[in-house]
Image (cartoon, rainbow, N blue to C red):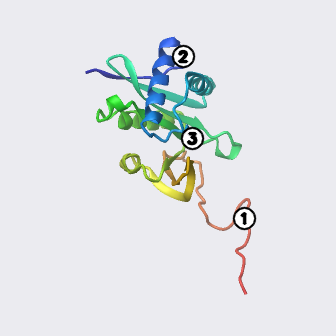
């Protein structure tokens, strides 16, 4: 079995078909990747074209993992569009086709996305994961991501509600950057309110 990574910038019919197969199968198996029911080909084609347009603009990356020449996993990073967050990117559409589970494709794809984002000059990656997806949370933690917040019961899947777990990974800061965190002072600062 041969596993190889590819970084497409355009999509031919074969890539569109194979990406659709993966995304459709993952959602059909209960995967939480943004669709409540398995997407049709028009939905996945529209998503793929949007991501690839961002890739060509330098604001995203898509990695696909091929097993014996066939796409069986995906992952992306997309630069945050807000001007004050342009140095940050969101990881998304981390998938592995159910038939290819256990091959380490998710880990391989996420590790590749992290390295790519770092080489593109991003300083922080973040992602969201459904609270009951303990396997994914564990994988992200093994790769260095840490939870920074949790919005309880905010993800809707039909009549079910799940926590939205937010995680981040600092990738490194340029030497000239000053890290203020939540310290008082500086632009946008206001004094703490006093309670009676």
Image location of residue 76, percent across then percent down: 51, 33
Residue extending farthest to the top is: 13
For the residues labelled 2 and 3, the Cα–Cα distance comes to 22 Å
Tell me which residue sits at (69%, 66%) in the image.
185
- Say which element carries label 1: loop
Quarter containing the C terminus:
bottom right
Q: Nearer the viewer, residue 116 or 68?
A: 68
Q: Mark 1 = which residue?
A: 189
The residue that disc 3 covers is 89
Residues 118 and 52: in front is: 52
Q: Nearer the viewer, mark 3 or mark 1?
A: 3
Q: Under tag 2, what secondary structure? A: loop
Q: Is residue 79 above or below residue 46?
A: below
User: Mark 1 or 2 closer to N-term?
Assistant: 2
Q: Quadrant of the N terminus?
A: top left
Q: Position of residue 151 (x, y in %)?
A: 56, 58
Which residue is label 2 attached to? 11
Residue placed farthest to the front in the image?
159
Residue reaching furthest to the left: 1
x and y percentages locating residue 62 in the rendered image: 50, 28
Mark toward the viewer: 1 or 2: 2
Numbered mark located on residue 137 in the image: none
State the CA–CA distance, disc 1 to disc 2. Answer: 46 Å
Relative to 163, is 105 on the left or the right?
A: left
- Which class describes the residues within 10 Å of circle 2: few (<14), some (14-19), or many (20+)? some
Q: Is residue 82 left or right of residue 170?
A: right
Earlier in the chain: of badge 2 and badge 3, it is 2
């Amino acid at each position: 079995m041969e596993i190889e990574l590819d970084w497409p910038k355009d999509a031919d019919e074969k890539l569109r078909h194979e990406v659709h197969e993966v995304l459709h199968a993952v959602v059909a198996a209960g995967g939480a990747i943004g669709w409540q029911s398995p997407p049709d080909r028009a939905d996945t084609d529209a998503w793929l074209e949007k991501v690839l347009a961002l890739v060509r603009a330098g604001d995203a990356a898509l990695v696909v993992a091929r097993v014996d020449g066939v796409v069986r996993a995906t992952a992306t990073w997309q630069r945050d569009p807000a001007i004050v967050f342009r140095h940050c990117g969101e990881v998304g559409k981390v998938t592995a086709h159910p038939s290819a589970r256990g091959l380490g494709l998710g880990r391989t794809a996420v590790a590749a996305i992290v390295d790519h984002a770092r080489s593109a000059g991003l300083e922080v990656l973040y992602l969201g994961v459904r609270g009951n997806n303990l396997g994914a949370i564990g994988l992200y933690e093994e790769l260095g991501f840490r939870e920074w917040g949790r919005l309880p019961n905010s993800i809707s899947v039909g009549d079910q509600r799940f926590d939205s777990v937010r995680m981040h990974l600092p990738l490194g800061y340029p030497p000239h950057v000053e890290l203020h965190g939540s310290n008082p002072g500086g632009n946008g600062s206001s004094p703490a309110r006093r309670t009676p």
